[in-house]
Amino acid sequence: MSNPRTEQPTGLRAAYDECSLITRREAKNFYYAFLTLPAERRRAICVVYAFCRYCDDAADDQRSTETTETKLARLDEIRADLGRSYDGIATSPVFLALADVAQRYDIPQEYFRDIVSGVESDLVKNRYQDFEELRQYCYQVASVVGLICLQIFGYRDPRAKDHAIDLGLAMQLTNISRDVKEDLAMDRVYMPQDEMARFGYTEADLQAGIVNESFTNLMRFQAQRAKEYFHSGFQLLPYLSFRSRACPAVLGQLYSKVLERIESVDYDVLHHRVSLSKPQKIRVMAQTWLGSTLSGLRPGAGKP
């Protein structure tokens, strides 16, 4: 891992500042976790977030009247911009800062390209036949971000990667469970089709907003899967330094609390909008930061 330098040219400094501004404005849950990082790593993580936001905005503005083909073309241009950045030819502040972060922390271009592919999936695919299909999507939009962050956090044991992947899966699966109603409004159903059939819950039931035993059992199954990934994901923490482990710990706890809220409404996400208030987020951040930095966890001993 390369060591980050402290001095930056004026243009690069401005590029980092713009990414930090985007993150403060848009990041919501993530921003509370980023605050726990040392300044240099926090600035790098903000660049990663700004890139993800840039990709999302290019493809997923529901108010836009642009065609799918136009959005796909824009994502292709992002891929080209990404390649140029790795070649030392940045095209905008976000890509200028990204090129610097990638070089400093030895981040493979493949990781960023996977994020673009994951965003692209939402333009071309709105149903998932089974969990293997869904897992690949979750890996691209969430787990790869975790692997990028892991490069910035720093690690020595390669086993950390498996836990970072699982933490990303857990968080994305929680998002999917929380956002069933909102996703349906965009004609997206992320729950695997074969699992819906197994539990006897149809898309017609979903469209009608029916919450019955089949729906509850289906959602309980999704939540249990997310819990298992959280269990593995939280075992990432002992592999990180005390200065870095609070960030993924806070993120994981924020999302696991959302999962608990889903359980508390008996999985009825069709009639309850599950979220955490700002005071709740701050409390989770404070408690988790203290716990993650003061604990004496060792590899393999982590737990949710």
Image: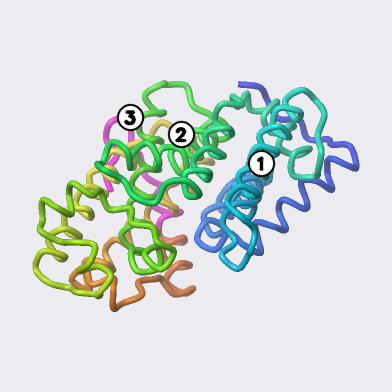
Residue at figure coordinates x 15%, y 61% from the top left: 201
Q: Which residue is mark 2?
A: 240
Question: Which of marks 3 and 1 precedes in the sequence?
Answer: 1
Q: Quarter-wise, where is residue 61 in the image?
A: bottom right
Q: Are marks 2 and 3 in contact (CB under 8 Å)?
A: no
Three-letter code for the amino acid on which mark 2 is drawn: Leu
Residue 299 is labelled as 3
Residue 180 in sight here? yes
Q: Residue 17: give its label.
A: none
* Residue 5 screen position, x and y as percent: 76, 30
Q: Residues within 10 Å of mark 3 (few under 14, many from 20)?
A: some
Q: Is residue 182 left or right of residue 71?
A: left
For label 1, the residue is 44
Measured from the top left, where is residue 259 in percent x and y?
A: 29, 61
Does the rendering let one see residue 38?
A: no
**For the residue marked with disc 3, what is the amino acid?**
Pro
Q: Which label's residue is closer to the chain start, 2 or 3?
A: 2
Say how many tags the image has: 3
Q: Which residues lie in the magenta part?
A: 288-304
The residues tagged by marks 2 and 1 sit, at their Cα atoms, a distance apart of 17 Å
- For label 1, count other residues whose C-alpha is less than 10 Å away and answer few (under 14), some (14-19) or many (20+): many
Q: Is residue 292 magenta?
A: yes
Label 3 SS: loop
